[in-house]
Amino acid sequence: MISVIIPHLDQLDALKQCLASLSVQRRPRQPVEFIVVDNGSTMMPDDVCSAFPEVIVLSELTPGPGPARNLGASRASGDILAFIDADCLADGGWLSQIEHCFSENAAIAILGGDVRIACQDPHRPTLLEAYESVFAYRMNEYIARQGFAGTGNLAVRADIFAEVGPFGGIEIAEDRDWGQRALWLGYRTKYCSNMIVYHPARRNLAELARKWERHTAHDFVRMQSKRGWRLRWIVRSVAVALSPVAEVTRIGLSNRLEGWRARGLAFFGVVLIRLYRSGLMLALAFGANPARLSERWNRM
C-alpha cells in the first residue's frame, strides 16, 4: 500500500484541488490511502475531505509541517510513504511513477520528484511565476548537492523512514535535516524527473518574504555553531546581494520560461529577493531574533 500524507493549514480551496488531482490519478496496482493532517487551522478540513471517501483526517497542534507529517506517518498503513503539500497538484502519473521506481529497483530507499510552477497563463507569467519557475523548488540540485528533496514531493519506504526518524520541528528546515540524516545513514535520495507535482507561485512578495525569513533564520542558527561565524555570515550576505549578476545565464537558458518578457521578469524578481535576503542576513548578524522569523510558518 502507498500512504499519501498531506499536511494542511488554512488552505481549504487548495486542499480541495490537491485531493481532486489525487483522485483522478492513473492508479498504481497496489491500494492507496490518503491522510490529511491539519496543523491548527481556524477550521478543520472535514467538509472538504468528506467529498473524497478514501481520505483520513487527523489533527496535530504542534506547529510546523514536520510534526504534521510525523503524525501522518505514524498512522499510515502503507509500506511506501508519499508526501505532498496541500497547495500542490499531483501530475496524473505521480503515484504510478512512485510505484514504478520503487518496484523497478529494490535498492531505492527514497525518491524526490520534480516540482514545477503552476502558472495561470504559461505564455504570460506574472513576476513571481517567472521568478519561481527558475529559482524555486530546484529538486534535482538539492538532491545532487545537498542530499535532500523537498517534502512537497517526497516518497520513502516506511521502514527506512522509521530508521531515519521523524521530521524536525518548525525551528529547523525539516526537509533538509531529514534528507541529510538519511544520507548519513547511507540512504541516498534518487531524483525521479517523471514524479511531478505542480505548485502555485506565491500570491505576493510578502508570502515569498516569509518563506525566506524562515529559511534564512534556519541557516543562521546552523552558522552560529561554526568558528568565526559572524564575519563569514556578513561576507555571505554581501555575496547574496551581488549574486543576481551570476544568474543571467541560468535565466537566459531556462527551458521553463518562454520569451524575453518572462526572462526579464525573472531577473527583476531575483534582484528583489536577493537584496531582501541580504538585508535579513545582516539584521540577524547584528541582533535580530531568528526564532521570531522561523515561527511564522504556522502563524501567518
Image (cartoon, rainbow, N blue to C red):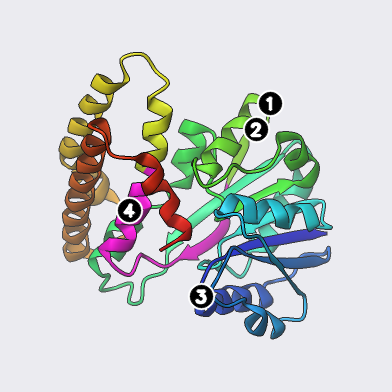
Determine whether label 1 and label 2 are within 8 Å by CB.
yes
Which amino acid does the dot numbered 4 rest on?
Val
Look at label 1 and name its amino acid.
Answer: Leu
- Look at the image and tell me whether residue 165 can be seen: yes
Residue 289 location (% of width, % of height): 33, 40
Q: Residue at x 55, y 67 (%)?
A: 86
Precedes in sequence: disc 4 or disc 3: 3
Cα separation, mark 4 vs mark 3, equals: 23 Å
Label 2 sits on a secondary structure element that is helix
Cα separation between marks 2 and 4: 27 Å
> Residue 134 bears which disc, if any?
4
Within 10 Å of disc 1 (Cα), the crowding (few <14, some 14-19, many 20+) is few
Q: Secondary structure at mark 4?
A: helix
Q: Residues within 10 Å of mark 3 (few under 14, many from 20)?
A: some
Mark 3 highlights which residue? 14
Mark before the other along the chain sequence, 2 or 4: 4
Q: Which residue is mark 2?
A: 182
Q: Is residue 220 above or below residue 135?
A: above
What is the CA distance from the residue labelled 4 to the residue labelled 1? 32 Å
| Residue in the foreground of this view, choosing between 212 and 89 | 212
Please state the horizontal and vertical placement of residue 256, each as a whole percent of the image: 35, 58
- The residue that label 1 is drawn on is 185
201 is within the stretch colored magenta: yes
Q: Which residues are magenta?
A: 192-215
- Seen in the image, is 290 located left or right of residue 249? right
Foreground label between 2 and 4:
2
| Mark 1 vs mark 2, CA separation in Å | 5 Å
User: Is disc 2 in contact with disc 4, using a CB cutoff of under 8 Å?
Assistant: no
